[in-house]
Amino acid sequence: MSPPTLYPFDEDEISESFVRASGPGGQNVNKVSTAVELRFDAAASLSFPEDVRDRLIKLAGSRATKDGVIVLLAQTFRTQDRNRQDARERLQGLIDRASVPPPPPRKKTRPTRAAREKRLEGKAIRSTVKKLRGRVGED
């Protein structure tokens, strides 16, 4: 079970266009526009806070245009309805991932005395191993 969505997108904020798909479908794929191109203007959306919008555009990567419009192409399935549902699920998944705040930055700490000693001990052992690889006696 997936966690509940914090920020559902508004249906008015998306636009869908239907295009011909590649892949499975036989003759049907050449006749019917089953692929869905979903566009969501994340930069202009008022459905969620600005920090979520910024993370969403960053997460979208190459799927986002310079204007902040996210373009998703769904053509995995043979039917238009299923591709439409898939595109919407993928958009909601992106929004859900963007709504999780990033973890706080790591606080820098110094190594403990025991950790420093353990490191030096390991270096000393390695050094002796390498010394033993040399010549044993003189010729």
Image (cartoon, rainbow, N blue to C red):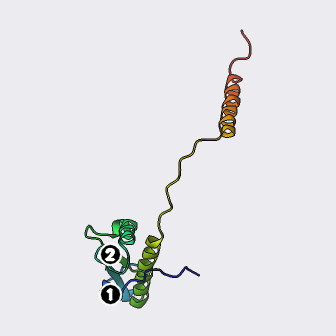
Left or right placement of residue 49 versus residue 124 in this view: left
Residue 18 vertical position relative to residue 93 in the rendered view, above or below: below
Give the percent coordinates (x, y) of residue 30. Answer: 33, 85
Dot label at residue 33: 1
Where the N terminus falls, by quadrant?
Answer: bottom right
* Mark 2 surroundings within 10 Å by alpha-carbon count, few (fewer than 14), some (14 through 19), many (20 or more): many
Which residue occupies the extreme left position in the image?
Answer: 67
Q: Amino acid at mark 1?
A: Ser
Gap between marks 2 and 1 measured at Cα? 26 Å
CB within 8 Å, label 2 to label 1? no
Residue 48 vertical position relative to residue 12 in the rendered view, above or below: above
Please report whichever mark, 2 or 1, sits nearer to the chain's N-terminal start: 1
Give the percent coordinates (x, y) of residue 124. Answer: 68, 28
Which residue occupies the extreme top position in the image?
Answer: 139
Dot label at residue 121: none
Dot label at residue 42: 2
Where the C terminus falls, by quadrant?
Answer: top right
